[in-house]
Image (cartoon, grey):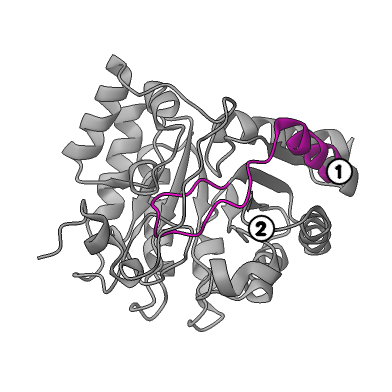
Amino acid sequence: MRDLKIPSQRHPEKAHRPDNAQPRKPAWIRVKAPGSARYKETRDIMREHKLVTVCEEAGCPNVGECWSQGHATMMIMGEVCTRACSFCNIATGKPPEALDAFEPGRVADAVARLGLNHVVITSVDRDDVEDGGAAHFAQTIRAIRHRSPETTIEILTPDFLNCDARVLEQVVEARPDVFNHNLETVPGLYPQVRAGARYFHSLRLLQRVKELDPSMFTKSGLMVGLGEDRQAVHQVMDDMRAVDIDFLTIGQYLQPTPKHHAVDRFVPPDEFAAYEKAAYGKGFLMVSATPLTRSSYHAGDDFERLRAARLAKLG
C-alpha cells in the first residue's frame, strides 16, 4: 500500500531524479500559515464528505486565506493522476479504483453546506477511463445545480487527450458557467514541464468549447518562472485570444520538492503588472496576474468582474 505522504511514494517516477535546489522565496511570495476557525470548519466538511481538494494536494500557497473564507477547490476522480508533469505535486501512478458514482452527490452536499456562491471543481487526469471523466464532470455539475441552483460553477478540466472528441460535448451540455483548462506553460517547455500533454490540443479544446457554446466563458492559466521568456508568454496570450479565451491567469511557479522542475527565477510583481496590462490590451475580458495567482484564487470575485466586463463590452 502506497503512503502518499511520503514523497518517493507520491512521485515514484521522480524518485531517482537528481535534486534541484529550492531557492529561498522572496518576501512577496511568503504567506501566513493557516489556522483560523473557519479554516478548520472547511477542512472538517471536506473530511466528512471524503472529498479531495487540489488546495492540499497541489500544495497551494493560498490555502489558509481561501479556506478561512470557506472556499475550497474540490478535486474529483480520486487523488492519483495518470500523468506525471514535472511541476505538479499531485500523486502520480495508476489510480487504485474506478470512479466513485456517489462522489458528485457528496460534492453537491459540501457546496450546499459551505454556502458557496461560486465553486471551482477540478480533477486529476484519468487516462485509464474511456471518456477521461467527462461524464463524471457533467454529473457533478448537474448535482450541484440540483442542490444549489444559485451557485455559479467553474470547472478546471483535463485535456481529454486520448478520448473521442465528442466527450467534450457532455461537459459543455451540462452548462458550467466557466470552462477552464490550463495551458500551464509556453509550448517550448512542454517536453520538460508537461510531457504527457500537447499544447495545440489544449488550445483546440478551448476553441471547441466556444464553438459548442459561444456564450460560455473560457479561461486558461500559465505559470512563469519555469524558464520561459517574455516573448513566449506574449505569444501564448496571442494564441489564447485567437481562440477567444476570455480570462487569463498568470502566477509564479513554486517548486514542490527537490525532485520537481527547478524554479528558474522569481518573477517580480512589476513584471506581473506588465503582463496584466499587455493581456488587457490584447482583448481579454479578465486578467489575474500576480505572484500568488492560481486558477481558483478569488475565483468568485473574479467571475463577477468577468461577467460585468462582458456586459460592458456588449454595451
Residue 245 or 174: which is nearer the viewer? 245
Locate residue 78 relative to residue 130 in the image: left or right. Answer: left
The answer to whether any part of residue 100 appears in the image is no
User: Residue 190 falls in which quadrant of the image?
Assistant: bottom right
Compared across the picture, whether 291 is left or right of 96 comes to right
**SS label for mark 1:** helix
According to the picture, the residue beneath numbered tag 1 turns out to be 278
The residue carrying pointer 1 sits among few (fewer than 14), some (14 to 19) or many (20 or more) residues within 10 Å by Cα, namely some
Tag 1: amino acid: Ala
Looking at the image, residue 266 sits to the left or right of residue 134; the answer is: right
Residue drawn at 35 percent across, 68 percent down: 14
Q: Position of residue 24 (x, y in %)?
A: 50, 36
Where does the C terminus fall, quadrant-wise?
A: top right
Q: Is residue 189 above or below residue 61?
A: below
* Residue type of the residue flagged with mark 2: Gly
Magenta span = 253-279
Residue 227 numbered mark, or none: 2
**Are the residues at dot 2 and dot 1 in contact (C-beta closer than 8 Å)?**
no
Residue 64 visible in image:
yes
> Looking at the image, is 26 positioned above or below residue 313?
above
Which residue is depicted at the point 31% across and 23% down? 39
Residue nearer the viewer, 33 or 67: 33
In this view, the residue farthest toward the left is 1
